Amino acid sequence: MEVLVGRRQLWDRAEVLASAMRLFRRQGYVGSSLRDIEAATGLHPGSLYRNFESKDGLFRAALDAYNDQVVRGRVREHLLEPADPVAGIRSFFTSAFETGPGPDPGCLLTNTAVESFTVTQAADAVRRGLETIESGLADALTRARALGLLSADLDVEVSAAHLLALYQGLLVLIRAGTPLTKLHTITDGAMASIGPKKEGQR
């Protein structure tokens, strides 16, 4: 929401970043023009440059906000808080594509990682987001192993890295319009890779 007071534009930073996140998720950095940014956020060019210095600055701020709000929120909800960490890992995967009606704009981290350009510091933000996910997966795997839901011999570090790679690949396939049946099959394969114990197994 923005208003003009005299010649100065007043706006809500959180709303601007939320709008910028949606735009960049949908169109990418390269595909988002300054006119698109103004239409999505309400920021006039002067306000954009005064507060974020450039389109790059807004993009970096949007990536940071995405990490703080979306990535950390999903990790907390599916990987850190569930009483059943194995079920939480599965829901972390399936919640990425069971989003209800309408096209999903995809993950801003994944979209940024595969876009063919370099924005100063964007790679660092992507890396931090991926490390947050990998750490959350490792936490869930460690708890699952301690609860006896996974083998005591499970290598948590290797399995967390493997799941992260599978998850990122899944997100690319989601963006490509892969059928839900195949996405569920991939999720089943990811879960099989960590070998949840069957009933009666020691």
Image: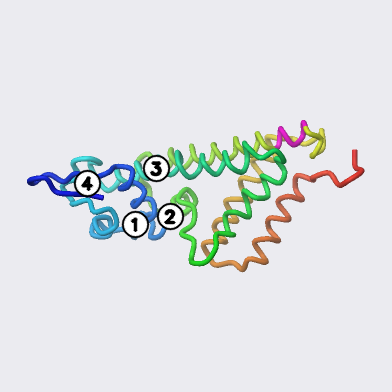
Disc assigned to residue 30: 1
Query: Is tag 2's residue or tag 4's residue first in the polypeptide sequence?
Result: 4
Looking at the picture, how far across and down is residue 80, in whole percent? 62, 36
Mark 3 crowd level (few <14, some 14–19, many ≥20, 10 Å Cα): many
Write the residue at 34% across / 41% down.
61
The amino acid pointed to by label 2 is Glu
| Magenta-span inclusion, residue 142 | yes
Write the residue at 27% across / 43% down.
12
Check the image and report above or below for 124 versus 102.
above
CA gap, disc 3 to disc 1?
13 Å
Q: Which residue is mark 2?
A: 115
CA gap, disc 2 to disc 1?
8 Å
CA gap, disc 2 to disc 4?
23 Å
Which mark's residue is nearer the viewer, 3 or 4? 4
Looking at the picture, how far across and down is residue 168, in whole percent? 57, 51
Element at label 2: loop
The C terminus - image quarter:
top right
Extreme residue in the top direction: 146
Q: Which residue is mark 3?
A: 122
The quadrant holding residue 201 is top right
CA gap, disc 2 to disc 3?
11 Å
Q: What span is in magenta?
A: 141-146
Looking at the picture, how far across and down is residue 155, in whole percent? 74, 35
Mark 2 crowd level (few <14, some 14–19, many ≥20, 10 Å Cα): few
Query: Is tag 2's residue or tag 1's residue first in the polypeptide sequence?
Result: 1
Of 104 and 135, which appears nearest the observer?
Answer: 104
The amino acid pointed to by label 1 is Val
